[in-house]
Amino acid sequence: MKILNLLKHIGLIIRHKNKVFIHCAKCGLVWRGIVHDLSKFSPVELFESARYYQGNRSPIGVCRRAVGVSYAWLHHKGRNKHHIEYWLDPDCEATPIMPYKYAVECICDKLAATKTYKGKDYSPDSLVEHWERYGNKVNGNPRTMRFIEQVFKDIKEHGESYVLNKKYMKKTYDVCHKK
């Protein structure tokens, strides 16, 4: 592992966390923005991610392609409730609904990650495209998945200022989670 990659990865984590914090704060979830992804500073996540750091995409995917598994990801998803995978149990047919605060944090995370990795090439289209690729691979609760998809479509159609607020998020979450 190169020290320079470690420092670059720490910088990337901080930039990402800053974006998530701003988005979460706009949605009324300041604490979720503060504690977001703190596990990325744990040795198992930090050192693996620094080793496979490239700067323009997640080192988790790079590690998976290189060695077949990412222990950083296994650690991360098991400690961070804003990841859909946290809520998955392969031995159960039903997937629980992600609670509101974690579902909104998930949205803020995906938005911030797309912005962080895309940089000046970010657009709402790239956010929706990422979600269409990722969302189809994950067997999350259908209502929660519908909520996330609706928010991303509304960001594309109406812009972030329309969507990133507590009133919009709560209303959309409630509509998507009705039985």
Image (cartoon, helix red, strand yellow):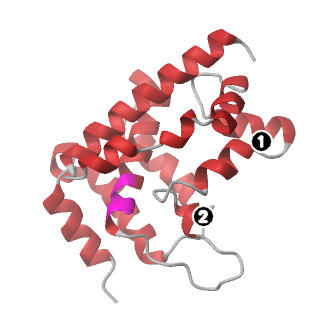
104 relative to 1 in the view: left or right = left
The x, y position of residue 51, in whole percent, is 73, 24
| Quadrant the N terminus occupies | top right
Q: Earlier in the sequence, mark 2 or mark 1?
A: 1
Residue at image location 33% in from the left, 57% down from the top: 104
Q: Are marks 2 and 1 in contact (CB under 8 Å)?
A: no
Disc 2 residue type (three-letter)? Val
- Asked whether 112 or 28 is in front, the reply is 28
Residue at image location 55% in from the left, 37% down from the top: 40
125 relative to 162 in the view: left or right = right
Magenta highlight on residue 79: no
User: Can you tell which of label 2 and label 1 is closer to the viewer?
Assistant: 1
Q: Dot 2 corresponds to which residue?
A: 138
Please tell me how crowded label 2 is: few (under 14), some (14-19), or many (20+) other residues with Cα within 10 Å: few
Residue at image location 49% in from the left, 52% down from the top: 131
Q: Which residues are magenta?
A: 101-105
Residue 64 is labelled as 1
125 relative to 60 in the view: left or right = left
- Asked whether 89 or 139 is in front, the reply is 89
- Asked whether 25 or 130 is in front, the reply is 25
14 relative to 34 in the view: left or right = right
The residue at the far bottom in this view is 179
The x, y position of residue 105, in whole percent, is 37, 53
The x, y position of residue 179, in whole percent, is 34, 90
The residue at the far front in this view is 43
Disc 1 residue type (three-letter)? Arg
Please tell me how crowded label 1 is: few (under 14), some (14-19), or many (20+) other residues with Cα within 10 Å: some
